[in-house]
């Protein structure tokens, strides 16, 4: 026990990050395309640089013979300057005649394209400096992802890029991360459009096959009507829990979240899961004059994920279940919700949903066959109501009585079923994929019956999806 305690203390008191863990990673590292490598100056040189194109061209049509075309062109670069310093980045330009589904997202999110933000182009990069064998500093503009799942309930890559600084410390079985970021509510008034966040993530490898981690994060607005708080120095503390700091700030406290992540590998099977806790008010479970068994207090904000991956030779199967309770990720102060550029930082459906995902893949030489299905039950808001799905609405607007509302349950509101089905075939030729796919999406409720189907052909050399599966 003393040895374990010593390892833990050394890990968090060392500077910060070394090698990147596969459960907390910068997304830019997964999107670098096949590169042309420049020859080294000499065989002993550490310095090398690679550049490569990024390309997506696709054409889609519907059963009504409506045609849509879009393309993305870009450039990626990867450079090792020395043993201690490396750089990865890419630039993309996206344009086209987007289909009706994407146009609806553009209008509802008030952005150019999901994941791109306000403009047709995007720049993502990270620069890493290896301070010593324990510590790495990473500075960048991009996205982070936590977990082993298709979705993440802690921090996902659905939103647009953002500036960040990340420190990682790795010592034996312990990896410790500090992430400092700045987000933006692009459609808010001048004050409070900018918000900051600080995140801790501590992962412990019990053995080669089992890892567990704890997560905490806090967001706060840069400005209020009364003052310009900027980046709160108290939240820069790398080793404390954020709840004591949050409570010390009284009315100006931020939006704190806590969670756990685990993954277990056994032969060809990997199990993983997450739990996110946004708020829990035990004292309000029973209040005077409330009837017996009147649960469902709106501040019981949590969600969980459980999933499994199987791989055998050329076959892969992935199944995942996600559930998030009403009002999770929201906040009484709208500016402090868990979002960036009008998109959720965790699950793209926001809250108040249940979701099941299945992905089946077969790889045969240069051919890939994939079928992805998604079924979700979401409790949507109707005019003038807030049932907890929209994280951009204030908690005070709870439909059954504001901040003291009881009787909430998952799926309340306008119960809506979303079904997404996407079979795809692709052929890889020298780093470029020629692909064809069918995209079917159904959205049904008592007030809506919408069916969309698209047939697409295209070429790409990096992973990019122009159909949103939510």
Image (cartoon, grey):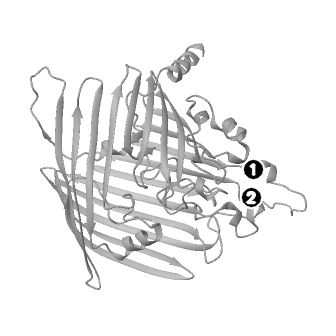
| Side of 281 where 136 appears, left or right | left
Which residue ends up furthest to the bottom in the rendered image?
Answer: 64
**Label whose residue precedes the other's in the sequence (1 or 2):** 1
222 lies left or right of 112? right
Q: Quadrant of residue 96?
A: bottom left
Residue 412 position within the rendered picture, expressed as x and y whole percent measured from the top left: 65, 69
Q: Tags 1 and 2 in contact by the CB under 8 Å rule?
A: yes
Quadrant including the N terminus: top right
Measured as percent of width and height from the top left, residue 4 is found at 56, 18
Q: Is residue 81 above or below residue 263?
A: above
Q: Looking at the rendered structure, which numbered label has been put on residue 265?
A: none
Query: What x and y, as percent, mark residue 116?
Result: 36, 58
Badge 1 is on which residue? 281
The answer to whether residue 268 is visible is no
Task: Name the outermost residue toward the right.
Answer: 289
What percent of the width, then of the height, locates residue 66? Answer: 27, 82
Residue ID at (57%, 54%): 192
123 on left or right of 134:
left
- The secondary structure type at the circle numbered 1 is loop
């Amino acid at each position: 026990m003393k040895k374990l305690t010593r390892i833990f203390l050394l890990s968090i008191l060392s500077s910060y990050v070394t090698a990147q863990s596969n459960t907390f990673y910068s997304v830019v590292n997964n999107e670098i395309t096949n590169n042309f490598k420049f020859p080294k100056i000499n065989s002993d040189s550490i310095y090398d640089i690679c550049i490569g194109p990024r390309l997506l061209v696709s054409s889609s049509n519907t059963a009504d013979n409506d045609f849509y075309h879009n393309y993305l062109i870009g450039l990626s670069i990867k450079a090792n300057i020395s043993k201690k310093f490396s750089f990865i980045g890419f630039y993309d330009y996206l344009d086209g005649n987007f289909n009706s589904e994407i146009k609806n997202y553009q209008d509802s999110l008030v952005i150019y394209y999901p994941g791109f933000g306000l403009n047709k182009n995007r720049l993502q990069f990270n620069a890493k400096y290896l301070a010593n064998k324990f510590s790495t500093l990473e500075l960048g503009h991009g996205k982070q992802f936590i977990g082993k799942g298709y979705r993440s309930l802690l921090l996902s890559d659905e939103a647009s890029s953002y500036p960040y600084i990340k420190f990682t410390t790795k010592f034996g079985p312990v990896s410790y991360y500090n992430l400092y970021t700045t987000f933006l509510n692009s459609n808010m008034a001048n004050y409070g459009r900018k918000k900051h966040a600080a995140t801790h993530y501590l992962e412990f490898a019990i053995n080669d096959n089992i890892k567990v981690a704890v997560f905490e994060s806090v967001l706060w607005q840069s400005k209020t009507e009364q003052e310009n708080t900027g980046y709160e120095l108290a939240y820069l503390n790398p080793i404390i829990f954020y709840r004591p700091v949050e409570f010390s700030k009284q009315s100006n406290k931020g939006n704190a979240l806590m969670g756990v992540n685990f993954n277990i590998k056994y032969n060809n099977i990997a199990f993983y899961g997450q739990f996110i806790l946004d708020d829990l008010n035990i004292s309000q479970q029973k209040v005077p004059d409330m009837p017996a068994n009147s649960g469902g207090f709106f501040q019981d904000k949590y969600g969980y994920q459980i999933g499994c991956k199987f791989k055998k030779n050329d076959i892969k199967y992935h199944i995942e279940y996600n559930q998030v309770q009403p009002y999770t990720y929201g906040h009484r102060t709208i500016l402090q919700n868990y979002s960036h550029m009008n998109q959720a930082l965790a699950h793209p459906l926001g809250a108040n949903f249940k979701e099941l995902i299945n992905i089946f893949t077969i790889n045969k030489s240069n051919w890939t066959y994939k079928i992805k299905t998604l079924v979700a039950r979401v409790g949507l808001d109707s005019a003038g109501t807030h049932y907890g799905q929209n994280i951009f609405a204030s908690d005070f607007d709870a439909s059954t009585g504001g901040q003291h509302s009881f009787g909430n349950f998952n799926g309340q509101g306008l119960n809506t079923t979303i079904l997404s089905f996407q079979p795809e075939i692709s052929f890889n030729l020298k780093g470029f994929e020629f692909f064809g796919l069918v995209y079917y999406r159904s959205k049904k409720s008592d007030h809506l019956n919408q069916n969309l189907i698209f047939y697409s052909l295209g070429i790409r050399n990096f992973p990019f999806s122009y159909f949103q599966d939510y």
